[in-house]
């Protein structure tokens, strides 16, 4: 059940960040494209800005992935330890 909550949290964070990125990028691009005097310089700024957004988006996805994986790995380790204890108990009963 906790994995479901973690997954839903990951989806909400990713959706929120995507919406934020879309609106901030569209606002920035509109202000640059409305200024016709500096067209070449603006194209360079747009490329730099889009590259920064891509790195930020990838970093955010890695962070969300890390947040999702750590509890899953901990849960997996706990299950393995529990199974090891059960095996030890069964081996003790056989002897």
Image (cartoon, rainbow, N blue to C red):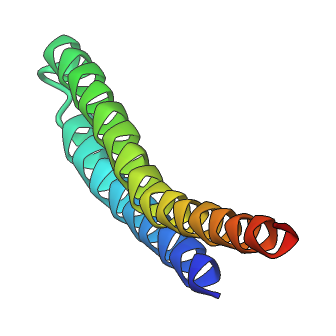
Q: Quadrant of the C terminus?
A: bottom right
- In the rendered view, does 61 fall on the left or right side of 33? right
Say which of 74 and 69 sits in front: 74
Q: Quadrant of the N terminus?
A: bottom right
Relative image position of residue 41 (x, y in whole percent):
14, 15
Say which of 35 and 50 sits in front: 50
Say which of 91 and 10 sits in front: 91
Instruction: Tell me which residue sits at (66%, 62%) in the image.
Output: 84
In this figure, what is the number of numbered marks? 0
> Which image quadrant is residue 29 in?
top left
Relative image position of residue 78 (x, y in whole percent):
54, 69
Indicate whether 70 appears above or below 40: below
Indicate whether 42 appears above or below 2: above
> Which image quadrant is residue 48 in?
top left
Indicate whether 56 appears above or below 9: above
Instruction: Tell me which residue sits at (81%, 76%) in the image.
Output: 93
* Residue found at the very far bottom of the displayed protein: 1
Indicate whether 63 appears above or below 39: below
Instruction: Tell me which residue sits at (54%, 60%) in the image.
Output: 77
């Amino acid at each position: 059940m906790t994995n479901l909550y973690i997954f839903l949290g990951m989806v909400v964070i990713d959706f929120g960040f995507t919406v934020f990125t879309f609106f901030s990028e569209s606002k920035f691009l509109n202000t640059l494209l409305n200024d016709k005097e500096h067209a070449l310089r603006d194209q360079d700024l747009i490329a730099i800005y889009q590259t920064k957004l891509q790195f930020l988006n990838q970093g955010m996805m890695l962070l969300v992935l890390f947040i999702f994986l750590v509890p899953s790995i901990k849960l997996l380790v706990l299950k393995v330890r529990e199974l090891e204890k059960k095996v030890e108990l069964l081996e003790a009963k056989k002897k």
